[in-house]
Amino acid sequence: MLEVKNRIERGELTPARVWEVTREKDGKVHRRQLDPEQYRRQQRAEWENTVAATRSKLRLSQTQFAETARHLRQDAAQLGTRPAQTHRRGARASARGIASSSNRVGRSGGLSRCNSARSLDGD
């Protein structure tokens, strides 16, 4: 399930549903359903910008950045952990289409994004 969430955040997988939740000053909560494919494209663009920004802050070329990632995957393999891309359980869950994404209003009233297997009302 964690791999499915990560794939949604990277824009690799389209969630089943996407909700935008906002809270007004009087405490009322409004929920609006968004287009899942549009959300995926937006997440993908944000992810690409984040990766490029990280590489820029580290002052690494694309080749150096890719080499560093390769070394991290090799280290994970030596420690006996599986890289995220080969996690089969997450791939099966995404193939069934059980992933969904939602926004939730936190206790402080702020808007935060949450990717989960259920929407806010448990659909």
Image: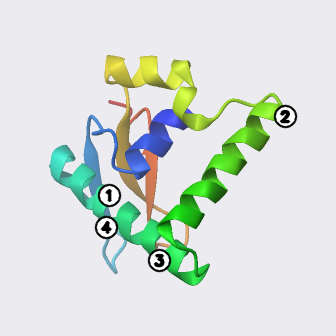
Q: What whole-number distance in Å separates the C-alpha atoms at marks 4 and 1?
A: 19 Å
Q: How many residues crowd around disc 4 within 10 Å: few (fewer than 14), some, or many (20 or more)? A: some
Q: What whole-number distance in Å separates the C-alpha atoms at marks 1 and 2?
A: 31 Å
Tell me which amino acid carries mark 1: Gln
Q: Measured from the top left, where is residue 45 in percent x and y?
A: 29, 63
Q: What whole-number distance in Å separates the C-alpha atoms at marks 2 and 4?
A: 43 Å
Q: Measured from the top left, where is residue 48 in percent x and y?
A: 37, 63
Quarter of the figure with residue 96: top left
Q: How many residues crowd around disc 1 within 10 Å: few (fewer than 14), some, or many (20 or more)? A: many
Tell me which amino acid carries mark 4: Thr
Give the residue at x 45% y 23%.
91
Q: Horizontally, is 38 left or right of 52 in the view?
A: left
Q: How many residues crowd around disc 2 within 10 Å: few (fewer than 14), some, or many (20 or more)? A: few
- Which one is closest to the eye, mark 2 or mark 4? 2
Residue under numbered circle 4: 22
Residue under numbered circle 2: 79
